[in-house]
Amino acid sequence: MQPAILHPGENQPGTPATLPVMESFYTIQGEGFHQGRAAYFIRLAGCDVGCSWCDVKESWDAAKHPHFTIGQIVGQATGFPGRLAVVTGGEPLMHDCGELTDQLARAGFSTHIETSGAWPLTGEWDWICLSPKKFKAPLPDILPLANELKVIVYNKSDFEWAERYASQVAPSCKLFLQPEWSKSATITPLIIDYIKAHPRWEFSLQLHKYIHVP
């Protein structure tokens, strides 16, 4: 039986910590540096960034999704052979991810997060994919910690905006440009031309939408 639905931050004293989970699933990582790898996704509910083109707007209201204990979340993940866990959202850093990453690591998982960086970093991560949004800027402290900078390109002005953040991440950070899905037909050629002229960037394709997996 699922635990009672609680609002974020309303874990009762003396009870195990819980997190609101919109969905979790085992699939292929479809984007960025780790594209093509088997991965268990944990999509935490709750987001205050509010991207107009978000394809999981149903994740925004955390109160609409059930809470699970960290043990339940990790226990479900261990039922699959892959040991790459991707925590995403919504905006996962709206929640304290410390215990989640601790338990995932103890279970043998490599811990990855996909975040806008708009909230303080919690948890111990093997890979931080920072995808900044214009709707709510990332906090400066997270920029030098990013392993991967993934910028969603919606229009031509986004290239200049992407360079602003590329100048603030570590030299070792991988740089990716990804077309916003609904405009991919018109934006993809622009990204290709931009990468050819600025070869430190790479192209991120939403592979999962082409091979029809979650």
Image (cartoon, grey):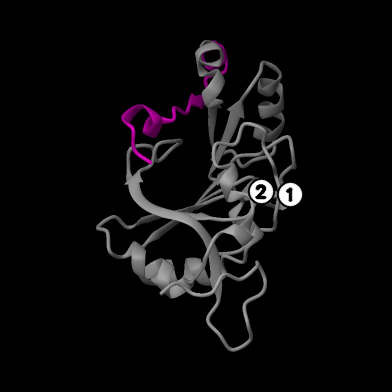
Residue 78 location, quadrant: bottom left
> What residue occupies the far bottom of the structure in this picture?
14
Residue 132 location, quadrant: top right
On-image quarter of the N terminus: bottom left
Q: Position of residue 194 (x, y in %)?
A: 57, 14
- Residue 118's place in the image compared with 123, above or below, is above
Q: Is residue 134 a member of the stretch shown in magenta? A: no
8 to the left or right of 200: right
Residue placed most toward the observer, 43 or 166: 43
- Residue 212's place in the image compared with 104, above or below, is above
Q: Where is residue 112 in the image (x, y as percent from the top left)?
A: 47, 53
Contact check, label 1 and label 2, Cβ < 8 Å: yes
**Which residue is rendered at x = 38% and y = 34% of the image?**
208
Badge 1 is on which residue? 139
Q: What residue type is labelled 1?
A: Leu
- Label placed on residue 117: 2
Q: Position of residue 53 (x, y in %)?
A: 62, 31
Q: Which amino acid does label 2 sit on?
A: Gly
On-image quarter of the C terminus: top left
Q: Under tag 2, what secondary structure?
A: loop
Part of the protein shown in magenta:
190-214
Q: Distance between the residues labelled 1 and 2?
A: 6 Å
**Which residue is rendered at x = 67% and y = 33% of the image?**
52
Q: Is residue 108 visible?
A: no
**Which residue is rendered at x = 48% and y = 71% of the image?**
102
> What residue occupies the far left of the structure in this picture?
81
